[in-house]
Image: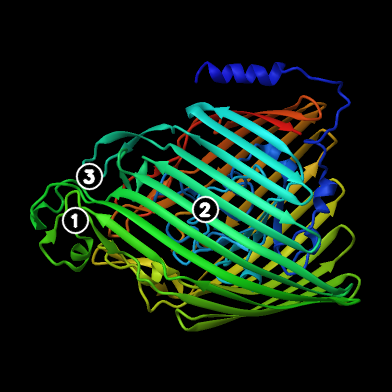
Amino acid sequence: MSVRLPLLLLCLVFFPAWGTDEIDDFYFDLSLEELLAVEVSGASFSIETLAYTPASVTVFTAKEIQQLGARYLRDLTNLVPGFQSKRQGESGGLFSVSGRGRQIGTSTRSVKIIINGQAITSGYVGSSIGSITTIPLDNVSKVEFIRGPGSVVYGSGALMGIVNIETYQQQNFAQLSFGNHDYASSVVNYYRQGLQFSAIFRGDLGERYSLKNVDTGNRVSAKDPYSESHFYLTKSTQKSRLLLHHHRNISSGFYSLDRVDNDLNTSDRQYTMASYNHRFSLNDYFDISSSIFLNVRRNQFSARLSAPGAVASISNPSSSAAIEAIGITRSKQYGAKLVADWIFIDGHLSVGGEYLYSDPVSGLAFANFNLQQLSDQQFPIDYYDNEPLAVPFIRSDENHTFAIFSEYQQQVTSKFNTIYSLRFDYAENIGEGEVLPRLAFIYELNERNFIKAFYSQAFRNPDAIELGTINNSSLLGNDDLTSETITSTEVVWFSQRSRFYFSLAYFYNQIENSIEQTSIQGTRVFLNHNKENNDGLELEYQHELNTNFSVRTSFSRIFNMLDSSFRVSDTTGSITLNWKHRRWQVNASSMYMSDTEMLINANNDRLTLPSYWYHNATINYQHNDQLHSQFLINNLQNRHYLTATVSTILDEGIPSRGRELMYSLKLRF
């Protein structure tokens, strides 16, 4: 690979430039003025520009994503104020996404991710990233990072933010990529007369790490290889749209449940989404949108759960083998949604309802020891050698969720806009309902400056893991859990010009009944905790200094950190410089994360993980109207920065990947 990459870089620089310099500037011609006119669709039931959206929003278009060389959602997340993405300690292939300084453990449970109008959800785990570990951006047309509560629109889970992704690209292209660690990627996107098909394949053989064996204290060599595939099929007409997505990610080695086992540790995650949407227009002022949807999630993982000999004295027959387990989970959700829209001279009214059914989750563990006896402390426990017994580790319960909602947007004066929203959600599995209001006020000081003020509430229902984990000696569910809720207020100053925009926001959050893990006699248990609050400041600035040079910056600071969110940074920032000239375009990005903490023992003692800067660079070259090259360098300094683990077994952080080099060639046809 050491020879291949320099050759690829030579191809980038000296690839023949067919035609003249007067070419279709397809990849580099997006101006800031055009970006400010991009419509935001995920913040409310109406579509607005950035200035009039009832939330703080950061938007990335397909061309910006292409220029940045962003491959995954996590590559954009750390460029957005208020959002953070870091490697999780549960598995080397998982990355969290947190919003506004809240993260429980290392999972994503406060940010809801939407793809083409459909939420990534699962009855098994309320985490979006737990369902799709990596979300590729190759066929994405737009990504909206919406800060603050969004449950009024999207229901349970949108506590601190929403990521709204649209994958409609009306173009035909093929792309090949190669890189170090034997990275390879292929992408095909085909569009014709409303039919779109996308296929994405990628993976590599992993980077080599020196990791700590928690059972012996010795260093061991490990890698983090992965492979993934993503398929999208969309058929659109003027009134309807049919979508089918399938995602699969396979990873192995590295840490799994905080232990290293290069031979046993594997994860195979699959997620399928299907939906059908249709709009009925009765006249120019009234229409009804209906949708039905389905998602199916399957996850298979294997891991070593103990040191060799850990249960030799309490097993029958006695065995010095380590506890090894394979877990398989399956879950399905079905739903339907109906929304009616009226447009008035000075207002817009939306009224609707939603129903979601979750099949009983199937969760089975196949282990070489009887995990149920171990959990119940029924000694001696049976040893099965190569004939493991299936033991359920999730209680199988179905769930029905019902919701009704309304939103009224009124243009009070030519400069004053108000939005009133209300939602009621009821979850049968916990027998609770939530009433959620949202008020938004947007005042236009002049054509360049706007003041926004928001008051909103959001909630998250406990998922199957939190309610029904059983037969587990280290983690148990709690069927007495109640929903966690948040009340948020926010004030925003938004300023825009043809080549400039600036946003400054202050927010205050109050969280009640937060669902967290608590250690009781060495076993982690989910409990509702008391009221806590945090507040912070977010700044975003983008300036097109001239036709060839632009800068984009972000900054966020959490003034009062939540007690449970010590694994996230209280201060983050980024700066991206963009330079273009004729056929060339160069991006340089730097991201900052302040120090974090992690637990290192059952006494809740903590270790401080140092702050770090992370630098990327991208060089783009447009050969002609159809052909485009890109050379990408992630982690320029080749530094293995550390992120927090999920449990207290490790006494050191999880290392990131070092420098990654990639070359891509994209052909439009």
Q: List the residue tagged with mark 2.
A: 132
Residue 448 in the image: state x and y as whole percent.
87, 57
Which tag is nearer the camera, tag 1 or tag 3?
Answer: 1
Q: Nearer the viewer, residue 429 or 440?
A: 429
Rendering coords of residue 373 (x, y %): 18, 65
The answer to whether the residues at label 3 and label 2 have Cβ atoms under 8 Å apart is: no
Q: Quadrant of residue 603?
A: bottom left
Mark 1 / mark 2, whichever is N-terminal: 2
User: Are there few (<14), some (14-19), or many (20+) residues within 10 Å of tag 2?
Assistant: many
Which residue is more in the foreground, 554 or 216? 216
Crowd rating for badge 1 (residues with CA inside 10 Å; few <14, some 14–19, many 20+)? many
Q: Which residue is mark 1?
A: 369
Q: Mark 2 belongs to which amino acid?
A: Ile
Q: What amino acid is found at the position of numbered circle 3 in the picture?
A: Asp
Mark 2 or mark 3, which is nearer the start of the sequence? 2
Cα separation, mark 1 vs mark 2, equals 30 Å
Q: Tell me, yes or no, if residue 609 can be seen here.
A: yes
> Any mark on residue 215, and which?
3
Mark 2 element type: loop
Q: Who comes first in sequence, dot 1 or dot 3?
A: 3
